[in-house]
Image: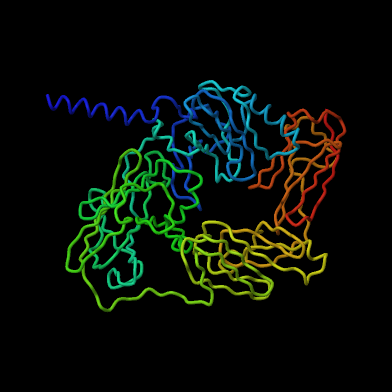
Amino acid sequence: MRFLIFLLIFSFNSNFAQSKYPQDYFRHPLDVPLVLSGTFAELRSNHFHSGLDIKTQQREGLKVYASAAGYVSRIKISHWGYGKALYITHPNGYTSVYAHLQKFSPKIEEYVKKRQYEKESFTIELFPTAEELQIKANEIVAFSGNTGGSGGPHLHFEIRDSKERPMNPMLFGIDIKDTKKPNIIGIYAYPENPISHVNMSNNRAKLRLIPQKNGDYKAEKIKAFGKIGFGVVTWDRQDLAANKNGVSNIQSFYNGNKNLEIDFSKFSFSETGHLNRLIDYKHFKKTKSRIQKLFIEPNNPLSLYKNVDNDGYVFVEDSTNSVYKLRIKDYQGNDTWLTIPIEGKIFKAVEPKTTDITDHYIKADQSNTLQEGNFTITIPQNSFYDDFYMDFDVKNDTLILHKPTIPAKKSFTIAYDISNYSDTDKSKLFIAKLNGYRDQYVSYSSTRRKGNSLSTKTKNLGKYTLARDTENPSIKPINFSDGKWLSKYRYLKLKIADDVSGIRNYRATINGKWILMEFDAKKGTLTHDFNDNTVTDTKNNLKVIVTDNVGNSSTFETTFFRK
């Protein structure tokens, strides 16, 4: 009888847990096998990945289906980011998102283009009412592409809750074939304070991994004392793809007791930038490898943590033997265990942690202002997570603002006084970031001019300089020449470029009337689709004006014919 009662309670709890997210409501948005190039919440540059990246067999133009009935609640087209993106709100309160699209379905495309022509803008953001673009289940709503910041053809697919928080679509029954255990690439130990040490050092220690026959790992025994944190480099791989993707869950245990869990099932966009508090940011900037810290430092607002004890740290006492374990899981429940034997031992002679002392100490909870030469740096309160010594110097027109190894929580301002420059020069100047091993690459940092001051807001430390752009953008036709008949052409294409400050905007007209030209920022191409039916004359005068970020402008004019 007791067993029957237990079975009924267990069955109820299991059904309740499974029904937390509807399992048969959302469908796979493509009609090809579901193979991923990116998983939910995996670690990206400065953010968590907010959906699934679904492979489209290295092709564009695959039919994209609504994952469930609803209405189009948002449409956004941008040069970077999601490119062409579609948002469908469903009766159950969730919203599905489809990004990097090639184009929309005919009825949505017509709706969008009408408003693009009204606003005379390719980039646009629209919020249709619930009645304007209603969608049926299994309706084709778009075609897959490679627009925006996409690195190759694929469909980015999301499910968000009523508060716009992205959630793992696999929670809703969208299944991925995965029978492989996650991989562990590296394990590190972090002494937390000056009296803590690992293997006679107060510095971060890389531990030697020993693979086991069953796919798990063991680390070589460490000798440690005091408050210690750990960090792991890990990734997962599904059955049908070679991509190194993110894991779903990480749990740590100390002497059999759980002391931290990181659950990658959902997050909010307001916290995604704090990924840089989860990883060892300095290590990442130097090696491009992301160590996930399994301890919680101050000023960490992430909501991914569960079952936290002592902020994930362990306390190793002298003359003891302890065991630290990790369990790393993918969404399908495949798990990999790592065991770290720990011998508690105090050493008198320990390699100390070194700190570079400079003249400028940044207090994270205070506002800070640095000034030298023509540069002024204004750092608002709570711009950084921790206090630190800032390496600050100015050499001619170049600013040295520490190394780019410390993450910022919010933007700070770099200003440059251009009073000593002529009016002609002032209009061509901008603030640029120096990149590359030898600072050989100059990238435009969005610059605002007010009077005799140039300023830019940034979250990146590093080197900045005052740069000048006196070159006009280039405009070249791709598939036509002056005086050509284009009656059998579907598209009109040009290539535009600016090698210094970059392109700010462009405008194209035919016979004085604005035409829509889609800008592929990755390829630098402008494309007009004659199926827009805006070109109705036989003789047509095309005029394209392109302006860069400091105001240099080029104009391209030509004539073509079309019946």
In this rendering, is residue 226 above or below 119?
below
- Please tell me how many numbered marks the rendered image carries: 0
Residue 9 in picture, x, y percent from top left: 22, 28
Residue 74 in picture, x, y percent from top left: 60, 33
Visible in this render: residue 57? Answer: no
Q: Residue furthest left?
A: 1
The residue lying toward the viewer, choosing from 456 and 117, is 456
Q: Residue at x 56, y 59 (%)?
A: 459
- On the picture, is 24 further left or further right than 362? left
- Location of residue 227 (image quadrant): bottom left
- Location of residue 120 (image quadrant): top right
Residue 454 in picture, x, y percent from top left: 71, 63
Residue 363 in picture, x, y percent from top left: 50, 67
Q: Residue at x 43, y 35 (%)?
A: 169
- On the picture, is 487 further left or further right than 271? right
Q: Residue furthest front?
A: 366
Q: Quadrant of the N terminus?
A: top left
Question: Please, which colouring scheme is shown?
Answer: rainbow
In this rendering, is residue 8 above or below 163?
above
Visible in this render: residue 208? Answer: yes
Q: Residue at x 50, y 64 (%)?
A: 364
- On the picture, is 50 further left or further right than 260? right
Q: Quadrant of the C terminus?
A: top right
- On the picture, is 217 further left or further right than 507? left
Q: Residue at x 82, y 68 (%)?
A: 422
